[in-house]
Image: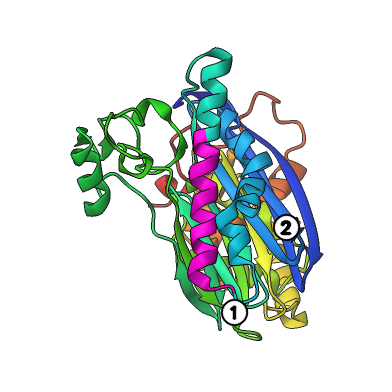
Amino acid sequence: MGAFLDKPKMEKYNSHGDGNNLRYGLSSMQGWRVEMEDAHTAVIGLPHGLDHWSFFAVYDGHAGSQVAKYCCEHLLEHITSNSDFQSALQEDPSVDSVKNGIRTGFLQIDEHMRSISEKKHGVDRSGSTAVGVMLSQSHIYFINCGDSRGLLSRGGAVHFFTQDHKPSNPLEKERIQNAGGSVMIQRVNGSLAVSRALGDFDYKCVHGKGPTEQLVSPEPEVYAIERCEGQDEFIILACDGIWDVMANEELCDFVRSRLQVTDDLERVSNEIVDTCLYKGSRDNMSVVLICFPGAPKVSPEAVKREAELDKYLEGRVEEIIKKQGDEGIPDLVHVMRTLASESIPNLPPGGELASKRTVIEAMYNKLNPYRSDDTVSILPLGVKWSDYFS
């Protein structure tokens, strides 16, 4: 937790699928972190006869990956098999009963993981946030425990987003203090940066307090939103490595612009992850993009503008390098700084120049094929492209 590499690991895990009138794509990348602690779940058609339901989630582990991995494999079963959730699926299920069943699943898996770790080798000290959606034919159930985030784009704008569970939030802080803890430097007891999580059992051992009254609570907030056919566009689920560098509206605008140039959701997800790395994210990064039939469609005009933009950037890279003349080929940072000082039309909204770094670097490498392999093509840890743009 908190350890970094000399260079980021940019290899990605990808997956995609479709069904139940949905399409999804996902991407995850280790980035600057020494370990990959993220995990994810994507299931279209759920067990126990829920063929028309779907479930997606992102888990952001900390202090190890054990809890995140266990949740990605078993949380869905704990939700769909518990008696509260099963009773919610009877003849006339209510929204509140479904929400209660989801909540029960979280509490059950948390207690189950505690008992497993105690039997095996003592208490596992890892933990994980969880953000997910469960989709029925009529509702979207957003589920959040921690500071990963999910949002819904509807009608061309951010319609809903989950609230991060931070120790400094008044209600979270009150629970922490009632359990005998404190909030220092916006962390639980000066250490943990989230106030709700699965695992983290060192923070769940206050005698006389129930599981939802501990320093760190495993209880999710569950929000039910009625689906709106034709207006619902897409859902984004992502860990804080994404949200640290992109605001809700920025990411939605960026995704919307990408969907107008490609229908490949893995590609869009990869562009999100790469752009966030280039914007300065230092964390593991995972994103799941779920598209409804109402999502933006590929536009020939947008595809043409994108091709023209790429061609323009390639031309400018060549001009900047040639301008140096006898002084030699400038480094990539100089090229980026020069481009950032210019007014370039039609850059992807939300992503801006950072989202075009791969195009710029590819042209730079083409014109400078013999540069040393030791040349670091990615910015040093903790440095953002924006630091060079002033």
Q: Local crowd at mark 1 within 10 Å, few (<14), some, or many (≥20)?
A: some
Q: Local crowd at mark 2 within 10 Å, few (<14), some, or many (≥20)?
A: many
Q: Residue at x 59, y 54 (%)?
A: 83
Where is mark 1, residue-wise?
Answer: 227
Q: Which percent across, then down, holds residue 150?
A: 51, 60
Toward the bottom, the furthest residue is 230
**Foreground: 242 or 77?**
77
Residue 263 lies in the magenta stretch: no
The answer to whether the residue labelled 2 contacts the one labelled 1, judged by CB atoms less than 8 Å apart, is: no
On screen, residue 178 versus residue 350, left or right, reads: left
* Residue extent of the magenta highlight: 93-111
Q: Is residue 5 visible?
A: yes
Q: Which mark is residue 66?
A: none
Residue type marked 2 = Gly
Would you place residue 307 above or below residue 133 in this image? below
On screen, residue 49 versus residue 65, left or right, reads: right
**Foreground: 135 or 103?**
103
Residue type marked 1 = Arg
Distance (Cα) linking label 2 and label 1: 20 Å
Say which element carries label 1: loop
On screen, residue 114 versus residue 187, left or right, reads: right
Q: Quadrant of residue 288?
A: bottom right
Where is mark 2, residue-wise?
Answer: 25
**Foreground: 330 or 269?**
269
Q: Residue at x 50, y 63 (%)?
A: 99
On screen, residue 189 versus residue 99, left or right, reads: left
Q: Which percent across, then down, holds residue 298?
A: 75, 77
Q: Residue at x 48, y 76 (%)?
A: 159
Q: Which percent across, then down, holds residue 211?
A: 38, 40
